[in-house]
Image (tube, rainbow, N blue to C red):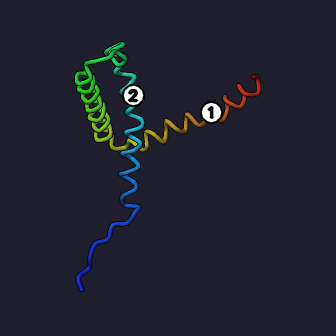
């Protein structure tokens, strides 16, 4: 009997979740950068092909920069843990105090 490899749902969900998360976050980032680089051109009527090319170019650049950061920094998850530990401290100390004052 030949063993056939099986693909579990968990092996698919992690890259899929990361891809969906990147798409959601990058859309907001690309839109803000698009407006900063080419102000007002997003709302002009016409030139759909040019806007699409600019949007695609900016998306690819952001994807490559984020990939390079992830590859260059091998301890990226450790850095994110440190940053989040500082962030959670300020959230747990200052936000309740501000809400109490308001």
Q: Is residue 97 above or below residue 77?
A: above
Residue at the spot 52% in from the left edge and 38% down from the top edge: 84
Residue 57 image offset from top left, x and y in percent: 24, 28
Please give the residue where the numbered disc 1 appears in the rendered image.
91
Residue 36 on image: x %, y %: 36, 16
Of tags 2 and 1, the one toward the viewer is 2
Quadrant in which the C terminus is drawn = top right
Neighbor class of circle 1 (other Cα within 10 Å; few <14, some 14-19, many 20+) is few
Looking at this view, is 51 or 101 the one in front?
A: 51
Q: Quadrant of residue 71?
A: top left
User: Which disc is residue 33 wearing?
Assistant: none
List x then y, in percent, for residue 13: 40, 56
* 47 or 88, nearer to the observer: 47
Q: Earlier in the sequence, mark 2 or mark 1?
A: 2
**Residue at the (35%, 27%) spot, across then down:** 30
Q: Which residue is at a point 23% across and 21% down the rendered structure image?
A: 50
Secondary structure of the residue carrying tag 1 is helix
Residue at position x 34%, y 21% from top?
34
Q: Residue furthest bottom?
A: 1
Can you tell which quarter of the image residue 89 is in?
A: top right
Number of residues whose C-alpha sits closer than 10 Å to that of mark 2, classed few (under 14), some (14–19) or many (20 or more): some
- Determine which quarter of the picture holds residue 11: bottom left
Q: Nearer the viewer, residue 57 or 41?
A: 41
Distance of mark 2 from mark 1, alpha carbons? 24 Å
Residue 38, relative to residue 52: is it above or below?
above
| Residue receiving disc 2 | 29
């Amino acid at each position: 009997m030949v063993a056939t490899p099986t693909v579990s749902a968990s092996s698919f969900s992690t890259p899929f979740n990361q891809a969906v998360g990147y798409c959601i976050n990058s859309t907001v980032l690309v839109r803000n950068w698009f407006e900063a680089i080419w102000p007002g051109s997003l709302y002009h009527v016409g030139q759909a092909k040019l806007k699409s090319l600019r949007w695609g170019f900016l998306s690819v650049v952001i994807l490559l920069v984020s990939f390079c950061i992830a590859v260059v920094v091998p301890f990226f998850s450790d850095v994110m843990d440190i940053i989040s530990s500082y962030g959670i401290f300020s959230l747990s100390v200052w936000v309740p105090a501000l809400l109490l004052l308001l």
